[in-house]
Image (cartoon, rainbow, N blue to C red):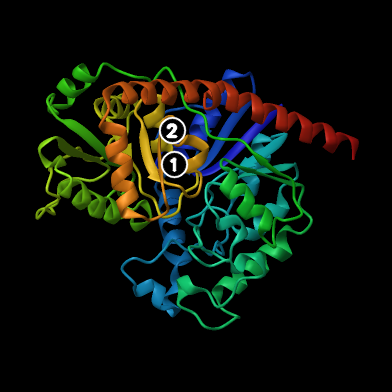
Amino acid sequence: MKALLLSHYDIDGGAARATYRLHQGLHKVGVDSQMLVQTKSSDDKTVFAPSGNLEQSLSTLKISAEVLPLKLYKVHRQKQAATFSLQWFPDKIVPQISRIQPDIINLHWVNRAYLKIETLAKFNCPLVWTLHDMWAFTGGCHYSGDCNRYIANCGACPQLVSSHNWDLSRWVWQRKRKAWKNLNLTIVTPSSWLAKSASSSSLFRDLKIEQIPYGLDTHKYRPINKKFAREILNLPQDRQLVLFGSVNATSDKRKGFHLLESALQELRQFGWQDKLDLVIFGASQPENPPEFGFKTHYLGTLNDDLSLALVYSAADVFVLPSIEDNLPNTVLEAIACGTPSVAFNIGGMPDMIEHQQNGYLAQAFKIEDLANGITWVLENKERHEKLSYRAREKTEQEFTLEIQGRRYSSLFEEILAKDKLS
């Protein structure tokens, strides 16, 4: 069985990192897995991407052209505009796939003008689509916020600040409905929240939807001696450390850094300012850093597994107050390193965080409860040790590369067996 994973990136970004880990997990269980990407950053010989200056220039041109229709809408001018993908620009993926001749194709995050919507119907083998956000079943948004128009047919899109039913979101939705109605397609979601959302959508409600969580290398992401980790990172030994981090940590509003700021104000009122430091990765210290009331250590962007494992191990608690999220790698990585995590009870967080067992699930967007959760994790040393133990235990039971690889391998074999009979 030859499986081909399609992804815009191989290791850059959360969805790409999760995809590449699956690629590794499939190899671990004996599946002939290859990746086809638009932008390659690794040196893995089983990952293929267009090479040469011309191909890279065309890719940049496509990305620029892809967003041109959005200039018709206010969303293009909004500072905090949500990600919105149209996927209308032609691609050259079919000839590349024909050369590889896979038995099954596993799509992942294929946006940024990588894969045109209509191209899926040209693939001549069964398709499995692993969703990393909501884009596949919406009219263009990657996270829908409070809008559930994807249940019907999109249009009058709040992210486009549109009041017209026949807007770009309806156009994208209609293209998907027309192009994908006869596909041999199975959907995989990493979280139960995303599975529920996909199954309620007008585009995917009649499809088979499997839930398979992400996996990670538990030999790389493991507890490291806290004193040693802090010494390597030049972090204080005599303070409790609250860790926050993600891609574009302080600027991506969806990750909720502004809500953490408010929770820190609550903690100051409880007298924690002399006990805690804040550690941030995924962002460098700005010229005029905000005053949180706590000493703050900015670690910048961290890309390698060892540095990330050191950071998680150095921390006493990891906090990710996302407004919307699927199954963020950062929480998985934190609990794998035995670091209890605190988050709002939204999205895929309950799939990873067992309330008061390996962390704390705060009531959605309740700042006081988020602060209470941080306090609850930190205030009792014996309880903290139990939380840490259970965090690592849950990772070993549910989130290893081998478990993920076996589940995908079984799904691929089942789909291919049915395809032979039909």
Q: Position of residue 400 (x, y in %)?
A: 52, 23
Asked if the residue under mark 1 is in contact with the one under mark 2, i.e. CB atoms within 8 Å, the reply is yes
For the C terminus, the quadrant is top right
Disc 2 residue type (three-letter): Leu
Can residue 10 be seen in the rendering of this structure?
A: no
Viewer-nearest residue: 55 or 83:
83
Instruction: Please say if 346 is above or below 380.
Output: below
Q: Quadrant of residue 170?
A: bottom right
State the residue at coordinates (65%, 37%).
Answer: 99
State the residue at coordinates (15%, 21%).
Answer: 231
- For disc 2, the marked residue is 332
Report the label total: 2
Viewer-nearest residue: 58 or 182:
182
State the residue at coordinates (63%, 67%).
Answer: 173
Disc 1 residue type (three-letter): Pro
- For disc 1, the marked residue is 328
Q: Residues within 10 Å of mark 2 (few under 14, many from 20)?
A: many
Q: Secondary structure at mark 1?
A: loop
Q: Position of residue 415 (x, y in %)?
A: 77, 36
For the N terminus, the quadrant is top right
Instruction: Please say if 75 is above or below 205.
Output: below
Q: Residues within 10 Å of mark 1 (few under 14, many from 20)?
A: many
- Classify residue 234 as left or right of residue 353: left
Q: Quadrant of residue 341?
A: top left
The dot on residue 260 is none
